[in-house]
Amino acid sequence: MTVTEPARAGPPPTVETVRGPVPVTELGRVFMHEHVFVLNEEIRQNYAADWDEEEQVGAAADKLSALARRGVATIADPTVVGIGRNIPRIQRVAARTGINIIVATGLYIYNDLPLYFRYRGPDSGIDGHDPMTDLFAADITEGIAGTGVKAAFLKCCIEEEGLTPGVERAMRAVARAHVITGAPVMVHTHPASQSGLEAMRVLGEEGADLSRVLMAHSGDTDDLDYLTRLADAGCLLGMDRFGLDILFPFERRVAAVAALAARGYADRMVVSHDASCHIDWFPAGLIGVFAPNWHLGHLLDEVLPALRERSVSEQQIEEMLVANPRRYFSPAGAGPAT
Ligand SMILES: [Zn+2]
């Protein structure tokens, strides 16, 4: 006999943030891909004489507080090792702003592994086991570097360089940590080379749940065949570089989201900027010249109005900003958290 049980009513699941667990129902509007700081830490320590820690922490908190005042309650920050992850610094920012900051674990590389991991590899380990898997999993289950802050998602990259041996090892370690912990995955992809498909294959081989995989930077293309292949496999599409019009123009970014929404894919997209409160990749003032719209206010000021003009409904916008992030950060099989 089959007994159909009523949906289990209990407290909503929680997601770890820098200030501790938050019910997923309280995440509100989420920008799913923004960075507080992107830094070359070793260069900063040696050469950035103009770095003022106190000033930078304060400026970042001010930018995030301004975003919170405009109704965005949460950002997901995929700054992992490779682009300057420093959780104590993020804790100082979080202490000065009400916005929720969700942090990640994983590795940001386009080519080779850091030498630290090169000689601590599956070839040198027992049973071909990769020590990165355990480090990433522990960031999720135990916390990061003694801070008590737990990562809530995993990050890896596959750029134009493709599946290099280093990229593959990092991706498989991320996939295994995902299988062990259940935490969702974000992949930095390069749509021009359709690298999301290769990521999907590798993650699938490792037994990843593709409905818990976000293909970041999918908005850098309007190739709907490519995008719907990822979405039909269950992946979330990160339409997450609004403002980087130099990489792909505003009109085409907006049109791609509108076209996908019209085809029923609003439940497969999230929107964001991939902006940073501070990034050291560019000389001071240059971003304002090459990407003047690449800041945290662009979505609210220009993108959402443009989507509404193209018949994207309020409900679809709320799906992309609220429901999809909530689902992504809910444990698999948790059911709809309302
Ligand atoms: Zn990013």
Image (cartoon, rainbow, N blue to C red):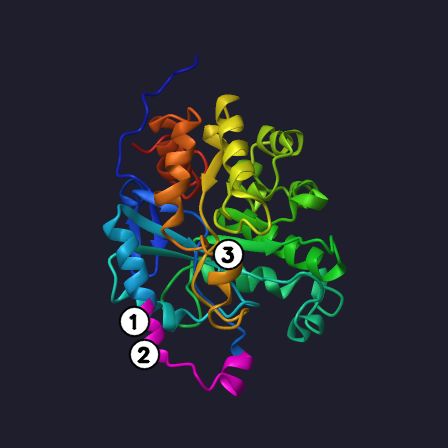
Residue tagged by mark 1? 58
Q: Which mark is residue 284?
A: none
Mark 3 element type? loop
| Observer-nearest of 108 and 239 | 239
**Magenta span contains residue 180:** no
Q: Return the residue at label 2.
A: 54
**The N terminus - image quarter:** top left
Q: Depth-wise, is mark 3 or mark 2 nearer the camera?
A: 3
Query: Tag 2, which secondary structure?
Result: helix
Residue type (three-letter) at the residue carrying disc 1: Gly
Residue 230 is situated, as x and y percent measured from the top left of the image, at 62, 34
* Image quadrant in which you'd find residue 200: top right
Quick check: marks 2 and 1 in contact, CB under 8 Å? yes
- Looking at the picture, which amino acid does disc 3 mark? Ala
> Quick one: 232 or 318, which is closer to the camera?
318
From the top left corner, tell me how far across and down residue 312 is, in percent. 41, 27
Q: Which residues are magenta?
A: 42-59
Count residues near mark 3 (Cα–Cα under 10 Å), then give few for <14, some for 14-19, many for 20+: some
Dot 1: element: helix
Q: Earlier in the sequence, mark 3 or mark 2?
A: 2
- Write down the residue under mark 3: 291
| Whether the residue under disc 2 has CB within 8 Å of ligand 1 | no
**What is the distance, in whole Å, between disc 2 and disc 1 at their CAs?**
6 Å
Which residue is located at x 37 percent, y 67 percent? Answer: 90
Q: Position of residue 285 (x, y in %)?
A: 46, 69
Give the amino acid at mark 2. Answer: Glu
